[in-house]
Amino acid sequence: MIEKLILYFQYPFVCYALIVGILIALCSSLLGVTLVLKRFSFIGDGLSHVAFGALAIATVMNLTNQMPLVLAITVICAILLLRTGQDTKIKGDAAIAMVSVGSLAVGYLLMNIFSKSSNLSGDVCSTLFGSTSILTLTPLTVALCAALSVIVVIIFVLFYHKIFAVTFDEDFATATGVKANAYNLLIAVIIAVIIVLAMNLVGSLLISALVIFPALSAMRLFKSFKAVTFCSAVLSVISAFVGIVVSIIAGTPVGSTIVGVDMLAFALCYLIGTVPRNA
C-alpha cells in the first residue's frame, strides 16, 4: 500500500489535487466556524448553486477561461444576499432559497438548450458532484487557487479580532466602532471565492459540506472560538488529504469521498464529545 501511494505521488496531477484540496479545505474551515455561529451556514449552499448557474452561462458563451465570470457573478450574488436584512420584504433565508433554486434551475435549463456536448448528463453530474477524475486540474488552476488561498488566510489572520467580534455580538461590535457590515461583506466575498475554487474538485452541491462539517466537529470538542477554529482547520485538512488519497486508490469521486471522510470525522468527534470530561 505504501509503495502504491509513493508511486501515485510521483504523478503531477495527484500533487495538484492534494494541493488544491488541502488549500480549499483550510480556507473553508476558517470561515466555516463564523458562518455556523452566525447561523448563516446555508449561504454556502445558496452560493454554490449560483456558481453552477454562472458556470452554465460561461459555457453557453463559449468562454475559454470561465473562472472570472463565475467568480464575478458569485461575488455579486453574495453581496446582494448579504443586503437582504431584516428591513427588506424578503428575509435572508427566503432570499437564499430563491436564489439557490432559481440559479440551479436556470443553469440546468441553459445547459439543456444550448448544450453542444453529447454527454450532457455527465457534464451536469460532474459540475454538481465534482469530477470523477482529478486530471482536470491544470497548473494555472493550482497557482490561482494557491494565490487566492494565501490571500484568504492573510485576511483572516489580520482581521481575526474583528471577525470574532462580529461573529458573537454584532450590535456590541458596532457600538465599539467596528464596521460590522463591512466585515460581513468581507466574509461573504471570501466564501464566494472559496466556492468558485472548490467547484472543480468537490462539485457545487457538496461545497457547503466543507464549510459545515469541520466546524461542527470542532464544536463537539472545544468551546473557545480560537480552539474551535484551529481544530476545524486541522480536521478539514486531514479529511481532505485522506479523502483524496482514498479516492485515488479506490477510484471513487473525489468530492464525495472527501465529504464522506468529513462525516466520519464528525461522527467520531460527536462520540468523543459525549464522554464526560471529569469521569
Image (cartoon, helix red, strand yellow):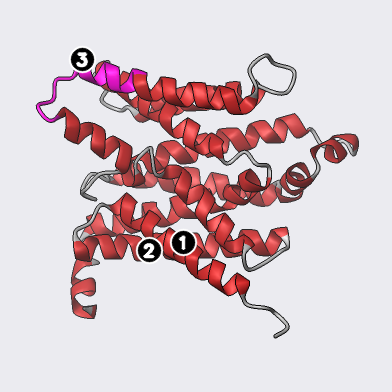
Q: In this view, does 66 lie above or below 256?
A: above
Observer-nearest residue: 250 or 275?
275
User: Do we see residue 202 in this rendering?
Assistant: yes
Crowdedness near tag 2: few (<14), some (14–19) or many (≥20) residues, C-alpha within 10 Å: many
Q: Position of residue 102 (x, y in %)?
A: 42, 20
The residue tagged 1 is 237
| The C terminus: image quadrant | bottom right
Residue extending farthest bottom: 279
Q: Is residue 61 above or below residue 266?
A: above
**Residue at x 59%, y 34% (from the top left corner):** 188
Label whose residue precedes the other's in the sequence (1 or 3): 3
Magenta stretch: dominant secondary structure: helix
Q: Does the magenta stretch include residue 213?
A: no
Disc 3/disc 2 C-alpha distance (Å)? 37 Å
Which residue type does callout 3 highlight?
A: Phe
On the rendered structure, is 153 left or right of 207?
right
Observer-nearest residue: 50 or 273?
273
Crowdedness near tag 3: few (<14), some (14–19) or many (≥20) residues, C-alpha within 10 Å: few
SS of the residue under disc 3: helix
| The N terminus: image quadrant | bottom left
The residue tagged 2 is 241
Which residue type does callout 1 highlight?
A: Val
* Image quarter of residue 65: top left
The residue tagged 3 is 114
Label whose residue precedes the other's in the sequence (3 or 2): 3
Q: Where is residue 90 in the image (x, y as percent from the top left)?
A: 63, 17
- Where are the magenta residues, as a range? 106-119
Which residue type does callout 2 highlight?
A: Phe
Nearer the observer: mark 3 or 2; the answer is 3
On the rendered structure, is 43 left or right of 255?
right
**Residue at x 23%, y 73% (from the top left corner):** 6
Q: Do the residues labelled 1 and 2 touch (CB within 8 Å)?
A: yes
